[in-house]
Amino acid sequence: MIVIERLFSEVKTIRMKYELLANITGENFNIFHILGLQTDEVRLHSAFLAELLNPNGSHNQGDRFLTLFINQLKINNFSTTSAKIFVEYFTTKISTDGENGGRIDILLKDLNNKQIIIENKIYAIDQPKQLIRYKNFDKSAVLLYLNLFGEISKDLERITDKLIVGTDYQIISYEKHIIEWLEVCMKEAAVLPIIRETIHQYINLIKRLTNQSTFKSMNTEIINLFRERPEYFKTVPSIEAAYKEIIKIIYDQFFTILGEKLIEKGLELSIEDSNLIIQLTAGEGDSGFYFAYRIVLKDNSERCNIFEKLKNSKKQNPIIPKTQRKDLFEKYSKIINGIIEGAEFSEYSLVFYNPPEFAGHKKLYQIDVNRYIGLYDKEKCNDFIDNLLRHEIENFEKIKKEIVL
């Protein structure tokens, strides 16, 4: 017990040192984070990258930044001087088989009609056949799949069985490729203070998102502490076991109570002349903790088993004919999206969205640590969920009025 207390004391000292360092250097001050844009793929990341890549961008540096990008990724035969950049480029309406159409996050096109397609992912869910659609848009285009760590998700593996990594498309990361490119861009902009510091702020944001901030040095120091004091290292399994147990208890308790309350409040609407209902549910995934409005079958045996569905939200998507589902989604998504600000669409939901407490795609464990640990107490967990649902019930009533009318 004494060894564990000493370990906690030394780790706390190290942490306080790095928190002080972050305060002194101003690392915690980030304009993109302050504005709540840190994980916004379209309004921040795609827009910012596209502006730097644009030879006609407001930076007035011509194709300098684009050339650095092309050279870093070793892309051949692309004319940077004549390049045009498009964000959220609309190709055509998505086809019935899902293999053509859609919007491209960032499209670069030169005078010779050579194209570079960038699919940009921060936390958003991979859409079925998304990369296949982009490849079919231009089979000779350079197709780049950009995400935080350069990983291929299970969803992407499932939906890109017709494409080969390294041949049909490349995976690049913010952690490595984008940061390395931006650091070179910052050097190129050394005598342009506003551009240089804006790039620097963006690099710091990316380092936060990819765990490369000052706290990476803190982790290194903690590792060295374990190396120097083997007796500390022996305590780790028991600490880790207790930590995992607390996480499991909090997680299970939170979603069990939430599921019970969602059932109790009956937040669902019948769709006229059908065996379908619109149901408010919730879940947690790559996009953090979210609420979602889904269309489910009234007689679906899993309909009210919300807790099980929360742990595997895809179970909530019933087998509804594609044509019927498309019409329903178009009709009701517009109504709900007009009431809930910041809602997004997906294959499985009419809309899904992060409630204010989970803005920026936070997961349950990423909320304020004191509030999170407080969820271990059942009464506090109930209070937290009641507050969480209060706003959702207000929105539900507004949606109900619109749909009924």
Image (cartoon, rainbow, N blue to C red):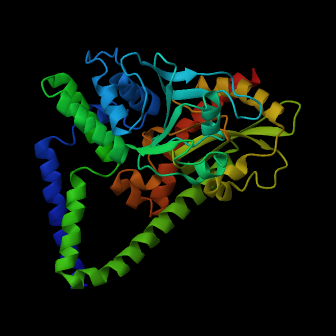
Q: Which residue corresponds to the image point at 43% horizontal and 29% vertical from the top-left?
A: 46
Q: Quadrant of the N terminus?
A: bottom left
Q: Which residue corresponds to the image point at 53% horizontal and 58% vertical from the top-left?
A: 254
Identity of the residue furthest to the front in this view: 77
Count of numbered circles on the image: 0
Q: Quadrant of the C terminus?
A: top right
Q: Which residue corresponds to the image point at 20% horizontal and 58% vertical from the top-left?
A: 217
Q: Residue 36, can we see it?
A: no
In the image, residue 25 lies at what x, y percent? 12, 43
Towards the viewer: 142 or 338: 142
In the image, residue 299 lies at what x, y percent? 85, 49
192 left or right of 282 in image: left
Q: Choose top left, top right, bottom left or bottom right for residue 252.
A: bottom right
Q: Residue 362, can we see it?
A: yes
Towards the viewer: 260 or 192: 192
Q: Choose top left, top right, bottom left or bottom right for residue 297.
A: top right
In the image, residue 209 lies at what x, y percent? 35, 46
In the image, residue 337 lies at what x, y percent? 60, 26
